[in-house]
Amino acid sequence: MIDKILGIGTLIIVLTILVVAHEWGHYAVARWFKMRVDEFALFFGPVLVRLGKRGDTEFNIRSVPFGGFVKIAGMDPDDISGGRPILQAIRDPQFSEPEAIKSLIRQFDKDTLANIDPEAVSPDTVKLIRECTSPEGVLLPGRREDLELKQASPDISPDDKRLIQMALLADSRANDKDLYSQKPIYQRALAIFGGPFASLAFGFLVFCMLGMTFGLPSDKETNIVQVLPSTDDMDSKGTSKNTSGVSPSSNAGMKTGDKIVSINATPTPDGKTMKNIIWKNPNKMLKFAVERDGQTLNFDITPLPFEQPKVENNKIVKLNGKDVMETVGRIGVYPMPEMERVGPIESVKAGSRITYANIAMLLSMFTTPGIQKKVGGPVAMGQMTIAVRKLGLGSVCMMMASYSLSLGILNLLPIPILDGGHLVLLAVEKIRKRRLSPKEVYRAQVFGLAMLAVIVCFVMYNDIFKTLTGRGYQ
């Protein structure tokens, strides 16, 4: 129970660090382009702790411990197309006739969800707004007060008040150069991309720093094992005749962090010895002696047969240009390599290789058949963190770096509501040379939210199914 509590606490800390890194990317790029950032918040819900204010930005910790956000002024759907175009349209002479102005208000209502009934708007209100507006689409000096007084009058309808409010907000947006909506499209795109880029850069940085701190995996393998939960996970390098179900090691009760002391009474001082014995005995029951928390446990495990390319002298054996295959036994464990510290240059080189390998693996999720069986969500992340924590802080940092890369890649998916979806909407705006209306943005976000809900439900189902069938991380 204590392991689970510590594991969940570790996961919360890891995710908090990743959220801060991701949102800092949005924040840094937005400030670079002089966009106003109203709030940098860790978590959601009501404000729990106010950390202070720097410039226009308020830094807060909120009460629901999940996620976080950066509130960039002018990113709300109504802000995106609001501003100068609304006042210019009202001021345009072609809309001077009553029916024309009603048609314009109907379009406003359709685009902005303003809930204005054109039949209830007084011609005097429209006339006042037109008189207060310059041909350039901004309010004339001193005329804002006239509109505010009119809006406060008890003699006008709620629809008049909403139209005046729209005009006042449009003027504010048109004159506020610090709004996201007033910036060039390339600056808005970079502010959106800043989050995923920061996640990718943070993961890369952690991998690079590991070599100089906790060390990088060496050729020397110990027999501290990572237990794979199912045969699906074991199929990454070969093909098993038993393609589903719980892995032999997990089924027997082994857990990540166990140390295999001997197999069939043969000592296993290193991972190489351990692998050789298991590989040479497919379909044969082996007796494992395992150390866990100072105690020795015994397991009877039968390795499953796997077909894989034969390797000699670190090279794949080929015959007539084809890989020579051999049958080996596997039980679903990985020997953990010893960690060795290296210099800065080698650390950066290794960090680059590991980052590339992780990104390639993430991208393969979208093309590899059956990869959905290996996708994990919150439950799997919690189980993995509980298991990895036993292997030490270095392993936790490696997991954190991997999660950071995942966060960056998944946020670039072209799903509205994610960063990739925002970039798609900006691309649509660039192609058609016209901003999307707030209603179009709302519809896209609702569609994106529905897609995200389906994905979350699938991932949660996958997590729960694996847990109930004994295939969760041990």
Image: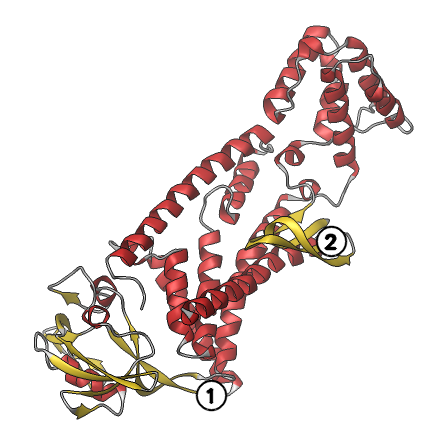
- Looking at the image, residue 140 sits to the left or right of residue 9; the answer is right
Q: Decide: marks 1, 2 in contact (CB < 8 A)?
A: no
Residue indicated by mark 1: 341
Mark 1 Cα within 10 Å, few/some/many (few <14, many 20+)? some
Foreground of the two, 357 or 43: 43
- Looking at the image, residue 305 sits to the left or right of residue 349; the answer is left
Amino acid found under the numbered disc labelled 1? Arg
Rendering coords of residue 169 (x, y %): 75, 31
Residue at disc 2, secondary structure: strand
456 vs 390: above or below: above
Rendering coords of residue 172 (x, y %): 78, 34
Mark 2 Cα within 10 Å, few/some/many (few <14, many 20+)? some
- Looking at the image, residue 38 sits to the left or right of residue 366; the answer is right
Mark 1 / mark 2, whichever is N-terminal: 2
Image point 81% across, 19% down: which residue?
129
Foreground of the two, 87 or 51: 51
Amino acid found under the numbered disc labelled 2? Thr
Q: Which mark is residue 44?
A: none
Residue at disc 1, secondary structure: loop
Image point 53% across, 39% down: which residue?
425
Residue 249 image-quadrant placement: bottom left
Rendering coords of residue 245 (x, y %): 18, 60
Colour pattern of the rendering: secondary structure
Image point 40% across, 62% down: which residue?
381
Foreground of the two, 434 or 425: 425
Residue indicated by mark 2: 57
Q: Quadrant of the N terminus?
A: bottom left
Foreground of the two, 342 or 301: 301
Rendering coords of residue 36 (x, y %): 73, 49
